[in-house]
Amino acid sequence: MATEADKALEEHGKEITKALRESAEKGNATCARLLLALADGLIDCEDEAVVEQLWTYAQQLAAEKQWEGPPAEPDED
């Protein structure tokens, strides 16, 4: 199972990170946190189910309509 997860991440890693990065740049905080968690090694990329979920999520993000309004503003705390 770990071999398949490695293969899936190796084959789709660029698409996953690209979709997460693009959505984070549009203001999606969840994608930003997920991208940081991946970069920090906090997500188990050896788990086939995790990689499959990331791939599915990346495909959904890539299929979303592009935002055509003003740039997202961060919330003030």
Image (cartoon, grey):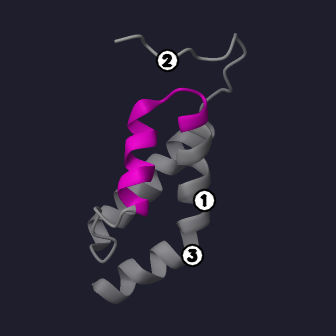
Amino acid type of the residue that numbered disc 2 sits on in the rendered structure: Pro
* 28 within the magenta span: yes
**Residue that appears at 47% across and 82% down:** 7
Residues 32 and 53: in front is 32
Sequence-first tag of 2 and 1 = 1
Q: Residue furthest bottom?
A: 3
Q: Secondary structure at mark 3?
A: helix
Q: Is residue 76 left or right of residue 47?
A: right
Amino acid type of the residue that numbered disc 1 sits on in the rendered structure: Glu
Number of numbered tags placed on the structure image: 3
Q: Do callouts 1 and 3 mark residues in contact (Cβ within 8 Å)? A: no
For mark 3, does the 10 Å Cα neighbourhood hold few (<14), some (14 to 19), or many (20 or more) residues?
few
For mark 2, does the 10 Å Cα neighbourhood hold few (<14), some (14 to 19), or many (20 or more) residues?
few
Q: Secondary structure at mark 1?
A: helix
* Residue that mark 3 sits on: 11
Q: CA distance from mark 2 to mark 3?
A: 33 Å
Quadrant including the C terminus: top left
Q: Is residue 36 left or right of residue 11?
A: left
- Specify the quadrant of the image occupied by residue 71: top right
The stretch of residues the image draws in magenta is: 24-39
**Residue that appears at 27% across and 84% down:** 1
Magenta segment's dominant SS is helix
* Residue that mark 1 sits on: 15
Q: Is residue 38 left or right of residue 20?
A: left
Amino acid type of the residue that numbered disc 3 sits on in the rendered structure: Glu
* 51 within the magenta span: no
Horizontal and vertical percent for residue 35? 45, 51
Q: CA distance from mark 2 to mark 1?
A: 26 Å
Horizontal and vertical percent for residue 37? 35, 55
* Residue that mark 2 sits on: 74
Q: Secondary structure at mark 2?
A: loop
